[in-house]
Image (cartoon, grey):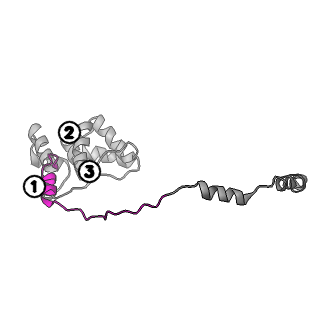
Amino acid sequence: MNFFISIFFYAIIPLMKNTNIDFKEIDSYIKSEFRYEIRESSSTIKEPILDYAAINDYISSTDDLLQKKIRQIIQSKNLDEVKLYKKANVDRKLFSKIRTLPDYHPNKNTLVKLCLAMNLGIEESESLLKTAGYSLSKSVRQDLLLRYCFCHKIFDVITVNEILDHYGEKII
């Protein structure tokens, strides 16, 4: 190894010095050829004019209200609400909040339990979860197990929890 280092210092370095690189000339070339512009902006940044009425119209015009979707599913499947929240293992007061308060945002597990209790398939469940801003990810093991249950029509919350627990995931 020392042999190669010696060759480098005694043979290669002197050759490099003899190439006579003119760094001043390179610097001069860069300075003369390099172009950049500093633009002066005559316009000023203006504060946006907020149209709160338009924002309110946009927000209220959405058809994807969670409460509306749940109501539609219950009506289309002719489900009894009392049996539904009991099957989902959801408290009556919580179910009432979900059904009646537009600003109430239930957690993902509560919605998953309602999807199971309503015997929803994977597409319907994902649609309902999406309405609340949730999803069943294919990269999260708990979500994969839940997807499996929906696809294989395993709708009993206790059975789903047994499956989740068996795989070391948090129960819903």
Q: Which amino acid does label 3 sit on?
A: Gly
Residue 7 vs 42, above or below: the answer is above
Q: In which quarter of the image is residue 45?
A: bottom left
Can you tell which quarter of the image residue 23 is in? bottom right
Residue in front for this viewpoint, 29 or 90: 29
Residue identifier under label 2: 119
* Residue lying at 11% horizontally and 56% vertically, measured from the top left: 96
View extreme (front): residue: 32
The image position of residue 104, as x and y in percent, is 17, 58
**Callout 3 crowding tier (Cα within 10 Å): few <14, some 14–19, many ≥20:** few
- Residue 139 appears in the rendering: yes
Q: Which residue is identified by label 1?
A: 100
| Element type at mark 1 | helix
- Nearest the camera: 100 or 90? 100
Please rate how many residues cluster around mark 2, counting C-alpha atoms within 10 Å: few if below 14, some from 14 to 19, many from 20: some
**Residues in magenta, as a range:** 37-65
Please, what is the three-letter code of the amino acid marked with disc 2?
Answer: Asn
Above or below, 168 relative to 120: below
Q: Nearer the viewer, mark 2 or mark 3?
A: 3
Magenta highlight on residue 66? no
- Name the residue type under label 1: Thr
Q: Can residue 98 be seen in this view?
A: no
Q: Quadrant of residue 10?
A: bottom right
Rounded to the nearest angstrom, the CA distance separating label 1 from label 2 is: 22 Å
Q: Do the residues labelled 1 and 3 touch (CB within 8 Å)?
A: no
40 or 76: nearer the viewer: 40
Magenta portion: prevailing SS class: loop
Is 57 on the left-hand or right-hand side of 11?
left
Mark 3 lies on residue: 133
